[in-house]
Amino acid sequence: MAKNRKNQSAAIRFGPALKALFLCLLFAGSAVGFVWQKNQIYQLGQQIRQREVRLKRLQNDDQKLSDQLSILRSPTMLDRRARELNLGLTPAQPMQVLRLAEPGPVEDRSLTRQFAERPAGAMTQ
């Protein structure tokens, strides 16, 4: 004899529908996660490109400023600038230059001594 559907429990009747709903939610959640992840990868790539462009620009600016500084520090540029400002600077006369001799190496007597010295006139036992 065939069983009557009215006698079946509610869990048996809604089981396939719940499984289908769960699978749909799983696929939809996976799809949303996939799209979100791809969007994050795209945004991070854009940030990397922007920072690489900024780094390249800063490196170029640094190189230009370094070149400008070396030009401004050159003796010819300093001499010309001193003349422009009328500072009255002239090269040093030979009598104004004081040359100092470099001292030789200093001997450290404490390193050569191995034992303590006795004062002169001390008695030994």
Image (cartoon, helix red, strand yellow):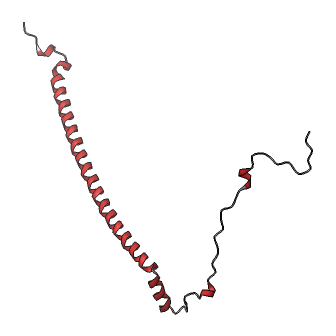
Q: Position of residue 64 (x, y in %)?
A: 36, 73
| Quadrant in which the N terminus appears | top left
Q: Quadrant of residue 57?
A: bottom left
Q: How many marks?
A: 0
Residue 66 placement, left or right of 56: right
Viewer-proximal residue among 98 and 27: 98
Residue drawn at 47 percent across, 82 percent down: 75
Residue 25 placement, left or right of 64: left
User: Image height check: is 43 above or below 53?
Assistant: above
Residue drawn at 42 percent across, 76 percent down: 70
Viewer-proximal residue among 93 and 19: 93
Viewer-proximal residue among 58 and 4: 58
Furthest toward the top, the residue is 1
Residue drawn at 91 percent across, 47 percent down: 122
User: Image height check: is 98 above or below 118?
Assistant: below
| Quadrant in which the C terminus appears | top right
Q: Position of residue 110 (x, y in %)?
A: 74, 52
Residue drawn at 82 percent across, 48 percent down: 117
Q: Quadrant of residue 46?
A: bottom left
Q: Quadrant of residue 96?
A: bottom right
Q: Position of residue 72 (x, y in %)?
A: 44, 80
Furthest toward the left, the residue is 1
User: Image height check: is 70 above or below 119?
Assistant: below
Viewer-proximal residue among 53 and 4: 53
Residue 120 placement, left or right of 102: right
Q: Position of residue 41 (x, y in %)?
A: 25, 49
